[in-house]
Amino acid sequence: MSLEQAWRSELVGTGFFALPLILLGLGTGYLIPLLWGGLTLYLGWHLYKLYRFTRWLGKPKRHPRPHLFGIWRPLMQRVDELSGRGRKRKRKLSRMLSGFLESTGALPDATLVLNDEGRLDWWNSVSAEFLGLDRKRDKGARIDDLISDPVFLNYLHAGHYGRSLQMPAPVNANISLEVRVVPYGKGKRLLQARDITRLHQLEIVRRDFVANVSHEIRTPLTVVHGYVETMLESSAAFLGPWKRILGQMQVQTLRMQRIVDDLLLLSRLETRRNNEGQGVVGVYPLLRGIVEGARQLSGDSGHQVSLEADERLRLVGNSHELESAFANLVYNAVRYTPAGGEIRIRWWLSGSGPCFSVTDSGIGIAPEHIPRLTERFYRVDVGRSRESGGTGLGLAIVKHVLTRHDGKLVVESEPGNGSVFTCCFPHARVAS
C-alpha cells in the first residue's frame, strides 16, 4: 500500500467513525462532548500505536513486532525496506572488511592504524613481529609509549611525513625498518614499517667499498700527479717531446683527484650523524668567499656574478657542508654558462623559510633530465661536462647536504633560457 492510499483509507475510516457520533450528538444535543470524546479516543489509539512502534523500533529483538494498519502500515513497510537495505549493506561491508583484513594480514609490511590521539586502533600480524605488539595488552595504547626510539618520536611528532624514516626494530636491533606515516581522515594516521635489512646491509657494503677504494686510489694518484708535475717543470731536453702528453696526464690526474675527493665527501656525508658539527652559520660571509671563487674560476670568460643576500639571516647547520653545496651550485653555473653570461646569487627569507638560489643565463636543461640530476655521475652532456672539469657528483653532494639539513632542491630550467637552482630550508633552521 502506498502512502497516498494509506492516507485516503485513514480519512475514510475517520469519517465512518465520526459520522455516528455527529448523528448521535445532533439527536441528543451533546454534539461537542461526543466529538471531544471521540477525538480523545482517536488520538489515544494513535499514541498507543506510536508507543508500540517506537518501542519495537528501538529494541526489535526485545519487543514483539506490532500489528499495524491504516496510516501505520506503509511506515512499517518503509522501515522493513530500509532494514533490508541496511542488512545488505552490512553484509557487503563485512565482506569488504574481511577482505581488507585478509589482504593486510598477507602484507610483508607492518601496518598500523592510529587514531587522532595517537592510539592504536588496529594492526596486522606482522606488526607483532617487527614492533613487539600484543593484541590484548596494546589495544588502545599510545604508539609513543610502545616505541621509545627518540628518532622515531621526533619524526612522529614533527608531522613532516614527506620522507620516510630508517630505524632499528624495537624487538631486534639487527633488523632495519623503513617507517612511513600517511595521514588520512580526521586526524588519523596509517603507519607502515618495512624490513630493509638486506638493502641496508648492501648499502653499507657499497658505501664501505667506495670509501676504501677512494682512500686506496688517493695515494697512488698523488704520487703520479707529483711525478708528472715534476717532469713538466723540469728543463731537461729529453722531456721536450713528452710535454704535451705529460700535460694531458696532469689534467686527468687532477680530474681523478677531484672525483676521489667528492666520493670521500659523499661517504662522510652518508656516515656522519645529521647533527654532527652543526652550529650557527653566517651564510653571508660564506657566500662572499664563494662569489670570489666563482670570479676566479670564470677567469677570462668574464661572467657577471652578482650577490643579493640578507646579511642578518643565519642558518643552523654545518658550515663546511653548506659551503660545499652552495659552491657546487655556483661553480656549475659558471661552467655551464657561456662567456659573458650572467649569474645571480640570492639568499633571503621567504614565506616558507630560508632560500638560496643560483640563476644563470646558461644552456639550460631539458625537462626529461631534471629528475635525474642528483644521481651520481649522471650528466646531461657527457662531453661538455668533461671539458668543463665536472665530476658528475656535485649535485649528488648538494642533495645529501640538503637532506641532512631538512632542505630540498628545486630546479627550474628550459633549454636555451638558463636555469634556476633553489635550496629551500624550513623555518626551524633559522638561527635566532
Image (cartoon, rainbow, N blue to C red):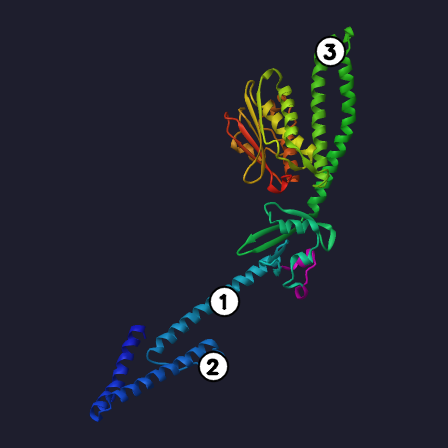
Instruction: Identify the residue at horizontal 36%, vertical 78% (top origin).
Output: 72
Residue marked by disc 3 = 242
Q: Secondary structure at mark 3?
A: helix
Q: Mark 3 is on which residue type?
A: Trp
Q: Find residue 285 and report its image quarter.
A: top right
Image: 374 above or below 3: above
- Seen as rendered, the residue at the extreme left is 27
In the foreground, 320 or 63: 320
- Mark 1 or 3 closer to N-term? 1
Is 368 placed above or below 82 here?
above
Q: Looking at the image, which residue is at 54% across and 22% down?
A: 342
Residue 412 percent across, percent down from the top left? 53, 32
In the rendered structure, which segment of residues is drawn in magenta?
A: 124-137
According to the image, label 2 marks what residue? 63
Name the amino acid, label 2.
His
Give the percent coordinates (x, y) of residue 32. 25, 87
Circles 1 and 3: CB atoms closer than 8 Å: no
Q: Quadrant of the N terminus?
A: bottom left
Residue 363, image x, y percentages: 53, 24
Q: Quadrant of the C terminus?
A: top right
Numbered disc 2: secondary structure: loop
Q: Is residue 65 magenta?
A: no
* 50 to the left or right of 431: left
Q: Is residue 271 above or below residue 68?
A: above
For residue 7, which quarter of the picture? bottom left
- In three-dimensional space, the C-alpha distance between marks 2 and 3, rounded to whole angstroms, equals 109 Å
Q: Nearer the viewer, residue 47 or 363?
A: 47
Which mark lies nearer to you, 1 or 2? 2
| Residue 21 falls left or right of residue 299 | left
Kindly identify which residue carries mark 1: 91
